[in-house]
Amino acid sequence: MTTVPPMATHPAELLAPYLADVEEALHGALKEFTEPAWLYEPVRYLFEGGGKRIRPILTLLACESVGGDRASALPAAVAVELLHNFTLVHDDIMDSSDKRRGRDTVHVRWNQSAAILAGDVMMGMAMRLLMRSAHHAPKPLDVIDAFSTGLIEVCDGQALDLAFMDRDDVTPEEYFTMIEKKTARLLEMSVAIGANVGGATNGRVEALRSFAREIGIAFQMQDDILDITGSEAFGKSPGGDIVEGKRTWLMLECARRVREDKEADPDHSQLIALFFANNGIARERVADVLSMMGTYRVVTDATALVEKFTLDAFEHLHIVPKSPARDLLEVLARMLMARSV
Amino acid sequence: MTTVPPMATHPAELLAPYLADVEEALHGALKEFTEPAWLYEPVRYLFEGGGKRIRPILTLLACESVGGDRASALPAAVAVELLHNFTLVHDDIMDSSDKRRGRDTVHVRWNQSAAILAGDVMMGMAMRLLMRSAHHAPKPLDVIDAFSTGLIEVCDGQALDLAFMDRDDVTPEEYFTMIEKKTARLLEMSVAIGANVGGATNGRVEALRSFAREIGIAFQMQDDILDITGSEAFGKSPGGDIVEGKRTWLMLECARRVREDKEADPDHSQLIALFFANNGIARERVADVLSMMGTYRVVTDATALVEKFTLDAFEHLHIVPKSPARDLLEVLARMLMARSV
């Protein structure tokens, strides 16, 4: 008699029920808001564009990992996704981005007023949903507090990011401060809200926050690395960040190393100067920048940092007792780090 | 022996302690937010520009009128003023307004990104302050609920207002729906929050809401009338709304009367058609529009409507027991209606 070995379950399948819950709740929530159509069509369009729903899944898993019922955290999870998309629609205006998830951005497809107002109303929608979960929390105002702090700090982070574009002396340390606010804080908020709805102790809320912060930083650095190493097959030309003059850790650390290198190739010094002076490098010179980054080993070191932040994240996670939900938080984190787009 | 008759106290003096409380709390709150300066300088600038602080004073008075301590409502009052100014800074972008309270608007003085982000972060600041008052409320989440509903509906109202600009068939009834959301809802929210913090019964919250709604509608109509009758001495040329094509009740009702008048002057019919086709009338023809409005008595009728809404507002107010704070709510409403700018 032969036995069929059990199929290894793909990580994405383990998370599928959570994703399905989020999608269903999200669509239910969007149905509550229809008029004026002029306002809510762009909101619906944003969510039809897809998205990995990482943040709301984090909220559900955080709630379960502290013994809560994920159904009670579902409206809050949708609130978190609304807040995330609010930042995207406003950032796309500020960054003059034409495309998002392969489709026209809201301000391109409609107009700028529609994009501003869609973002604004999504914050109101998010608050309303948040309250439905807050009712289940032992300390409802802690849920609202996590949300408002997340909102403030994500704005702080975006302001820092925009201010970096006027400076040629941003340090790699400042980069960390910026992504901690702009990227990591929303992930922190996602788990903090879920944990609070689930009735977590302060210690566990903090442990989950630390986990999410380290994952957030690793995630953003991974994003920056993929921009350098990514393949055209995924619809992105490598080096878009270099062309746009984005102050990533890779570029800032490379600049520091070139500037500190007394024997630096003058071409390298010139490339760094050009990058900051023109807020970006012409597409045809991206290959030269990539070669310079190779010389200074910044992609290698960034990859090691991603690994370090991820391992640190798991350390924090282990303060929470072992459970299927805690395992899935780790699965989700590993999926994020393993992605190629 | 002669006696000096007691000086009648000017209404503004009765409200001065409330205004002073608001200003102090507002400045205290702004001091908590300083970095990144790039983000918070525009926020501070907005508030240095002044403002009547009607909404936060409404919050304090509503709280006192139901027997609450106004100190507990003070952070919420500041939150309400932040939300109001959030709508102004974003509306100014959408309306391409260059001036606000006689000074450059934020997007003109800095740039559009600064104006979008300043508005966004002000909503987070508002939520954080709101919670400080919500802690004092018997039902904290009702405070948050009033706020989020206010935010959603003010966006709905702005969307309706913008959508009106593409239409030549807006009815005077639709105008009321729009200003109820865009203008009145924020005043309703202001009193609802104050009343909830003060521990009001649902009946009193509703009575105060109805008072604020009617005052809000009267206030906006008064604003529209002042635009027509206002003097250049106040820095406004009469008829700015006509030039900009704004769908005010005056214009919509005038259009309806002209269209229904079988013996209408062809010049009048042409002016109405021009107004909608070009989204405004050339400055040199404003006098013709004013004369047409005189023929159709719309300013007279609008003034009567303002009177009616104000009296209705006072009816609702009288459901709340008589108290100095209730008297001051009436004083504030009368001041708003008596203003000439």
Image: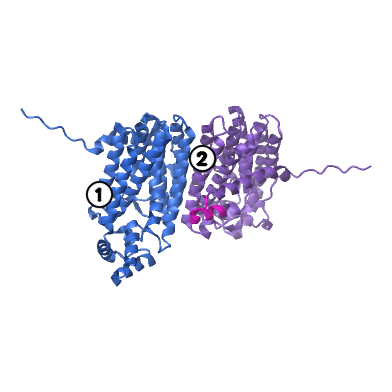
Chain colours: A purple, B blue
**Residue lying furthest left in this view?**
B1
Decide if residue B186 is on the left or right side of residue A148.
left
Quadrant in which residue A6 is drawn: top right
Residue B315 place in picture, x, y as percent: 32, 41
Residue A57 place in picture, x, y as percent: 64, 42
- The chain ID associated with circle 1 is B
Decide if residue A209 is on the left or right side of residue B191.
right
Q: Where, quadrant-wise, is the N terminus of chain B in this rendering?
A: top left
**Disc number at residue A16?**
none
Task: Decide whether the magenta segment is chiefly helix, strand or loop.
Answer: helix
Question: Which residue is denoted by mark 1 in the rendering?
Answer: B340
Question: Which residue is denoted by mark 2 in the rendering?
Answer: A153
Residue B228 place in picture, x, y as percent: 27, 57
- The chain ID associated with circle 2 is A
Q: Which residues are magenta?
A: A33-44
Give the residue type at disc 2: Glu
Quadrant in which residue B238 is drawn: bottom left
Q: Residue at x 61, y 57 (%)?
A: A102
| Kind of element beneath mark 2 | helix
| Kind of element beneath mark 1 | loop
Do we see residue B292 in this rendering? yes
Query: Is residue B336 or residue B37 the one in the foreground?
Result: B336
Decide if residue B271 is on the left or right side of residue B157.
left
Give the residue type at disc 1: Ser
